[in-house]
Image (cartoon, rainbow, N blue to C red):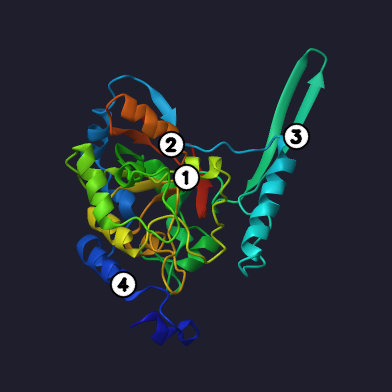
Amino acid sequence: MTIQETAPELAGPDPLAPWLRQIADAHEGAHHDDGRQCRGSIALIDEAARLRGVAEVRSGRAISLEREVETRPDRLADGRAVADAEKAQWQKLGIADLPDGHGSVELDVTVGIHGRHAHGGDVIRYDAHGVHNTHMDGLAHIGADASWHGPIPASDSQTDEDTMVNWAQHGIATRAVVLDITAVRGVDWVVAGEPVTSAELDTALAATGVAWAAGDALVIYQGRDRYEAAGNVYPSGAAAVTRPGIGQDGAEWIAAREPGLVLWDFHDARDNPTGSLEVHNLIYAIGLCLVDNCLLGPAVRVLAAAGRSTALVVAAPTAIHRSTGVLINPLLLY
């Protein structure tokens, strides 16, 4: 019995395109067992995947993939100016009412000084999504038919949805395979209106010389650091406009490779009539673990200088019950 039959109020257009439904159906047939809740792509990271990653650590060096989270009072005014400029830019295109505080972090710090002793504490409030801070999306971020991937009832997010706890306890560490799309195209960054294609992803993977295995991590560099250094503003996820990134063709390629997780700088291209999120919808279709807004340029350049395209990636989320996403500092060890 379908959800629409038991809950008529959920009837309406399918939020997933037919090609996504096909991917979801294929995944369910291959990975879902009666009485067992699927935990998505993280379940593909097993002992063999972790050992593949560990084998890539040769120099003992590490590099962070996290964009800095700005909380310094003297810098926040500049941050607000950038946010205002971003909003004005998209309003010129007829896109109004973007949410305030998108990607914001509020940090309340208390400092006590008692004689020669001092102590500090803080309370933090942040947006776990958006296009600014590096974060991991949980299964409870994108859903359909009143359900998250698993299947997990969407209503569980009000009580005890535990994706992040499960993923944190599972241990997200695997071999990372770095795909440099800018090198494939011979450009500084991917541009809007030209989504990354499956052919380009194939070429980038072939350039690594790696024999891909399910459960590996895809690190997809599209040049966002150079794009922003040149003064460009990456569109907010609230603006359903075509932007640099990966479209349907690339999303289908990703799903077919069955990565343990994907770490990227640009997001979905939204190069489709409805402006839907081609890759983000794989969170529902296959339970894909996505780490958004990674700072990849420095890592790509360091690895290239070392003649490397693989490393061990460790992406350990905070185990917060009912969290739809968490800020995270992914590390590459090589």
Residue underneath mark 2: 297
Judging from the image, what secondary structure is the residue with disc 3 in?
Answer: helix
In front of the other: label 4 or label 1? 1
Distance of mark 4 from mark 1, alpha carbons? 30 Å
Q: Would residue 110 be found to the left or right of residue 94 on screen?
A: right
**Label 4 belongs to which residue?**
21
Of the numbered discs 2 and 4, the one sitting upstream in the chain is: 4
The quadrant of the picture occupied by the N terminus is bottom left
Lower position in the chain sequence, tag 2 or tag 1: 1
Labels 2 and 1 touching (C-beta < 8 A) = yes
Circle 3: residue type: Asp
- Vertical order, 301 against 45 (above or below): above
Quadrant housing residue 273: bottom left
Q: Is residue 28 left or right of residue 221?
A: left
Quarter in which the C terminus is drawn:
top left
Q: Which residue is outermost to the right?
A: 115
- Seen at 50% across and 51% down, the residue is 325
Q: Residues within 10 Å of mark 1 (few under 14, many from 20)?
A: many
Helix, strand or loop status at disc 4: helix
Determine the residue positioned at 37% across, 21% down.
Answer: 61
Q: Residue at x 71, y 27 (%)?
A: 120
Provide residue 19's location: percent of width, then percent of height.
Answer: 30, 71
Q: Which mark is residue 224?
A: 1
Question: Vertically, is 92 above or below 221?
Answer: below
Q: Do the residues labelled 3 and 4 touch (CB within 8 Å)?
A: no
Q: Can residue 334 be seen in this view?
A: no
Q: Nearer the viewer, residue 179 or 255?
A: 179
**Residue 174, picture quadrant:** top left
